[in-house]
Image (cartoon, rainbow, N blue to C red):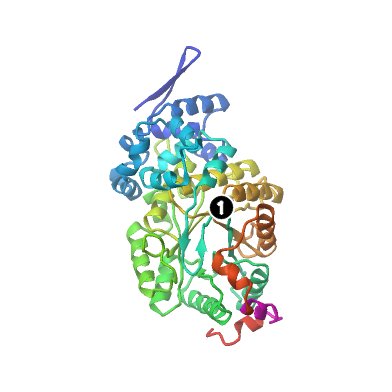
Amino acid sequence: MVYSHTVRGITHSFADLRTLLAKASPQRSGDELAGIAASGSEERAIAQMTLAELPLRTFLNEAVVPYESDDVTRLIVDTHDAEAFAPVSGLSVGELRDWLLSDEATPIRLASLAPGLTPEMAAAVSKLMRAQDLIYVARKISVVTRFRTTVGLPGRLATRLQPNHPTDDTLGIAASILDGLLLGSGDAVIGINPVSDNPQTVTTLLRMLDHIRQRYAIPTQSCVLAHITTQMQAMKAGAPLDLLFQSIAGTEAANKSFGITLDLLAEGHAMARELRRGGIENECGGENLYYFETGQGSALSANAHLGSGGGGVDQQTLEARAYAVARHFQPFLVNTVVGFIGPEYLYDGKQIQRAGLEDHFCGKLLGLPMGCDICYTNHAEADQDDMDALLTMLGAAGVNYIMGVPGADDIMLNYQSTSFHDALYLRRLLGLRHAPEFEAWLAGDTYCELKRIGQPSALLLGGAL
């Protein structure tokens, strides 16, 4: 269906819904690389005006990715909650923006609305919003998840302690863990990106993390960010796995490029549930077991953005569609690794900041526990000042958690993120606190014992490595 808008007597037309969404997106290098971006500010503004007038019901009648050929689309359509959608079913995209910013959009109503919104609706309304709009609405939404700690409560900020090492050396990893714990990091998860993606390495690292957690009675959860099939092999071998990790994307083809399907995610989830390692049930009586990571540009980098025949879906809409995959599995954590893929997709600090706010807003609007790896690669036109600005904005927006990397410099993945000290800054600036279980541990005797151990090697003593 063609969508049109007349400005000063001139009618501007957009061939279909995916074209309209792409042209309405704020500028970013990935859409320009794909050849689907607006030609300039004027076309972008006209597309946004056209999008603002579009009835929300349009997204239930026209798919940006065909239902017949894409399992993510089928998941979105088949699980849509018509009853939850009913209160806003008569609104346009622009009217939804106005409602979200109004006092009528209370935290309770926003939580009830989440199952009724499709990712494309969330992406569309975000394209009409300024940075302050994205921050203000996201701040109203709390998405709380539970494992051994409770993450996402208002007035709280958690961190992932990220102790990566370029050779998976356990002593080097222990040094980073000790550093992070002594600076109050790790209440969301202690998560290692392994160099070697094999079951033996994953099992060794999981056993080390579990030994440290139990020895010092740390209320947290561990994760080794290997491929899901590797983690499943480790589980079969008896590895003490807490959170199951996987990167996900917004199309079936992009997920296949990661070596996954929705059925495989379900199989892994069932295996993790059988381990019964979580200590706290969520509000729905189930378990939050997944740690998902996403990032704008992943589908385009895999040539899975449906652009081979001309048009193509913009990267921000595809990112929002990944949240439908995440939402289906009730994850403990979702992390947009916003600047990690590189300047080909988000060119500079301004684009990274905008994308981080969009991702956080869309994820929370859809009912997800959103965190953000506030990061950039060394060949992007960005620096730590840009990350400080995004860090502060996301803190104001109520982000569930951020990364804690030694010195903000990941020496294994070779990118720049946020440090243990950045989390301290944000907590002190905004009066935020740790996850409650972790906060209590920081005030206890075992934390005092940890502070006295002196050497990272002491963390490993007695571990079954």
Q: Residue at x 62, y 79 (%)?
A: 446
> Which residue is nearer to you in this view: 224 or 102?
102
Residue 207 in percent (x, y) is at 51, 79
Residue 6 in percent (x, y) is at 45, 17
Q: Is residue 287 above or below residue 140?
A: below
> Which residue is nearer to you in this view: 265 or 105?
105
Report which residue position mark 1 lands on.
399
Figure label count: 1
Q: Residue furthest top?
A: 9
SS assignment at label 1: loop
Q: Residue at x 37, y 55 (%)?
A: 328
Q: Classify mark 1: residues with Cα within 10 Å, few (<14), some (14-19) or many (20+).
A: many
Q: Is residue 30 above or below residue 233?
A: above
**One can see residue 110 in this view:** yes
Q: Residue at x 58, y 79 (%)?
A: 216
Inspect the magenta stretch and tell me whether residue 447 lies in it. Answer: yes
Q: Quadrant of the N terminus?
A: top left
Q: Which residues are magenta?
A: 446-456
Q: Quadrant of the C terminus?
A: bottom right
Q: Quadrant of residue 240?
A: bottom left
Residue 378 in percent (x, y) is at 67, 53
Q: Identify the amino acid type marked 1.
A: Val
> Which residue is nearer to you in this view: 418 or 42?
418
Left-right relation of 106 to 174: left
Residue 29 in percent (x, y) is at 57, 40
Inspect the magenta stretch and tell me whether residue 48 lies in it. Answer: no
